[in-house]
Image (cartoon, helix red, strand yellow):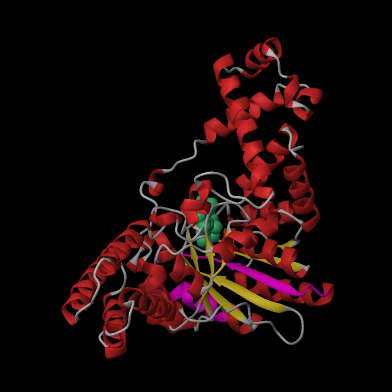
Amino acid sequence: MAFESLTERLQQAMGKLRKKGKVTEADVKEMMREIRLALLEADVNLQVVKEFTKSVRERAVGTEVLESLSPAQQIVKIVNEELTKTLGEETVGITKSPKIPTVIMMVGLQGAGKTTFAGKLANYLKKNENARPLMIAGDVYRPAAIDQLKVLGQQLDVPVFEMGTEVSPVEIVRQGMELAREKKNDYVLIDTAGRLHIDEVLMTELKEIKEIAEPNEILLVVDAMTGQDAVNVADSFNQQLGITGVVITKLDGDTRGGAALSIRQVTGAPIKFTGTGEKLTDLEVFHPDRMASRILGMGDMMTLIEKAQQEYDEKQAEELARKMKENSFDFNDFIEQMDQVNNMGPIEDLIKMIPGMSQIPGIENVKVDPKQIARQKAIVLSMTKAERENPDLLNPSRRRRIAAGSGNSVVEVNRFIKQFKESQKMMQQMSKGSMPAGMDQMFG
Ligand code: GDP
């Protein structure tokens, strides 16, 4: 996940102050020097770093902070607020047209993730607004782009308008818009071509499409992995086309995250979404305050809750709570839970969204081995229906059969069943309102 080392460095810089009873101006200066270095190392644009540190310093050396009872906490608060400001302050959603269709045009360099984002956005609009989008395949240069969009459309049951690669994109968009009006689609998502670098021909084409489609949104898709280059690209697209928002993709990768921190300041265009993986559901609405809190290692419970809500409906949640309380959570539930949690993204990332977790030593080394999960699933799948519903049936001979059937050793099967029973107990305790031993200290 992006920002890992930045989070660590910022926490170190601010942690030093926490240990001090009284904070002096020199302490603040020292901290600012470290924050500045941390940001530069994370590849944040120099001008942005300068402005950010200037505002934090000005507020932090104000007498009310230095003389307050908890200066370190005050400073964390200031850093958090200034970071939120840098990231854009407000959450900015899609601007809708007063009459349908709302037209959204995707632009950006080749490989940035435009086509993938078009699919993710169609999925998001369908799920959240019950929308009926139409996607237009306007990338006639990258050979596979049209097929890629068609496959996405099929997966999502969203129509894709295409005219192959021989017709000009401007004409494709013109006819696609006509179709959308005729079919009364509420959204039109236009996938356009990218190049490896910005060039005149491309810009002219995009300007023509803009004229024809009169988009409500021109979303620039940039790849977080390209660092400062993403900021430069955003700047020139903005100057030529006037973008209305930015989508930062590949924030799941091993990026330093500087682009995400700089783009808003440099272009003035708000970040609207982030891409956090290759799956269609790996899309997050961008909330500056939540992102700031995540960067500072303060967790992001809101996003965690929303992710869970996408996977569970209320009835399921009630059913689960009942099972936990009555201790009737069985292996079938276990498999179901495992699949749903898996859909929420890597467990390592979810853990970090819980406030305070990122400060637990060694947490960044927690890795959940997907093979281990697959092994456990194989064990459950080798059980009979009766065994899955009643773990008490699992006597030694049944365990031997399950081990052979799932390609595991009996020791592994025993260990898994023991773990399962322990977690059953823990769930029962938690559902009765008490924290299992040890966990209360973790959250204290
Ligand atoms: P386009 O040329 O701009 O249309 O780019 P594509 O949509 O074809 O994406 C290029 C590659 O990036 C594909 O392999 C995508 O699966 C991948 N990709 C797109 N968005 C993300 C993301 O948020 N995270 C990751 N890890 N990969 C992504």
Residue 79 place in picture, x, y as percent: 36, 76
Look at the image and tell me whether residue 4 can be seen: yes
- Magenta residues, as a range? 184-209
Residue 19 place in picture, x, y as percent: 26, 66
Q: Is residue 204 magenta?
A: yes
Look at the image and tell me whether residue 168 can be seen: no
Taking the spot 62% from the left edge, 53% from the top edge, the residue there is: 148
Residue farthest along the left direction in this orientation:
26
**Occupied quadrant, residue 48:** bottom left
Taking the spot 80% from the left edge, 25% from the top edge, the residue there is: 385
Quadrant holding the N terminus: bottom left
Residue 208 place in picture, x, y as percent: 57, 80
Taking the spot 75% from the left edge, 60% from the top edge, the residue there is: 158
Residue farthest along the top direction in this orientation:
397
Q: Is residue 51 left or right of residue 419?
A: left
Q: Is residue 236 magenta?
A: no
Taking the spot 39% from the left edge, 48% from the top edge, the residue there is: 364
